[in-house]
Amino acid sequence: MIINVHAGHSLKCRGASGLLDEVNEDRAVKNRVIELLRANGHTVYDCTDDVGKTQNANLRNIVRKCNDHKVDLDVSIHLNAGGGTGTEVYIYSDSSKAKDEATRIAEKISNALGIRNRCVKTSTKLYVLKKTKSPALLVECCFVDNAIDKVKWNADKCAKAIVEGILNKSVNEHPTPKPQSNTSNALGTYMITASDLKVRTGPGMKYRVKTHNELTKDAKAHDYDRDGCINYGTRVTVSKFDGDWAKIPSGWVAKRCLKKV
Ligand SMILES: [Zn+2]
């Protein structure tokens, strides 16, 4: 399968917090979900956004990343708040192609954590479900402000349950990851914004290209794509590589390929 996975909200516009912090936990789940899916041979794109400063910017960034790939499923990972207990999974409508996966995920999280199964719910108002092009589901793993959910919470168990719900089979909790090729997809479409690449070096229009360290110092694990490369922003099509740097029509550097850390 080819699957988009993202954690909800952004480091600059955080989600719910109570006994648990949504952004911290949804990223822990998301990272583990991606690891398990890849270890089981699936192609996964991490569509998490950590630069959006407002809820709208965050949602737009996520959906743009999701719709960049044609996938079998979009998976959005959140934690709930507002007085309740248990897990629930949203789909856009009852006829969603993600309904079976959603049903299994809710059931499996409920069983794995020992919290209430609030089952599958439909909503036509959730932006990610409305705007993504592929079948999509949004997991509300548990409630951040419920004492029972907090005590029972385990991000790794939750991630395993989500993966088993998606794949409809049991997965090994400690898989041996398949070695990732760092070159097979070296040419293709990469993400960058021109302004990310340059630093002003003097008055007027004096610029130099950023060093590798400058480009990567703020990169988080989810900024690395499946080739172990970093995504920076706007889409450009790469035509040529010189060493690790890609040449693009407007100048130098589309992306530096790096081993995932
Ligand atoms: Zn949320």
Image: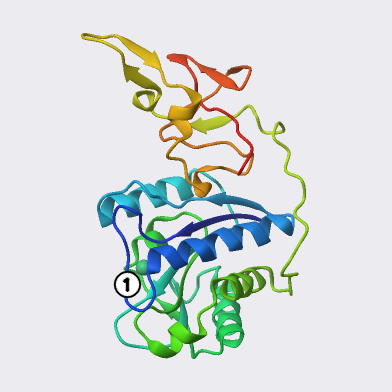
The quadrant the N terminus occupies is: bottom right
Q: Which residue is mark 1?
A: 17
Type of amino acid at the residue the image marks with label 1: Ser
The residue depicted at 44 percent of the width and 83 percent of the height is 150
Local crowd size for mark 1, using a 10 Å CA cut-off: few (<14), some (14–19), many (≥20)? some
The quadrant the C terminus occupies is: top right
Where is residue 103? Give x, y as percent: 56, 80
* Colouring method of the image: rainbow
- Figure disc tally: 1
Q: Is residue 197 left or right of residue 247?
A: left
Q: Secondary structure at mark 1?
A: loop
The answer to whether one can see residue 74 in this image is no
Where is residue 202? Give x, y as percent: 26, 10
Where is residue 245? Give x, y as percent: 56, 20
From the viewer's perspective, is residue 180 above or below residue 84? above
Q: Is residue 144 left or right of residue 100?
A: left
The residue depicted at 50 percent of the width and 73 percent of the height is 95
Report the image quarter containing ligand 1.
Answer: bottom left
The residue depicted at 48 percent of the width and 57 percent of the height is 6
- Between 163 and 21, the residue placed more toward the observer is 21
The residue depicted at 39 percent of the width and 88 percent of the height is 147
> To which quarter of the image does residue 72 belong?
bottom right
The answer to whether one can see residue 208 in this image is yes
From the viewer's perspective, is residue 59 above or below residue 223? below
From the viewer's perspective, is residue 154 above or below residue 24? below
- Determine if the C-beta at disc 1 is less than 8 A from ligand 1: no
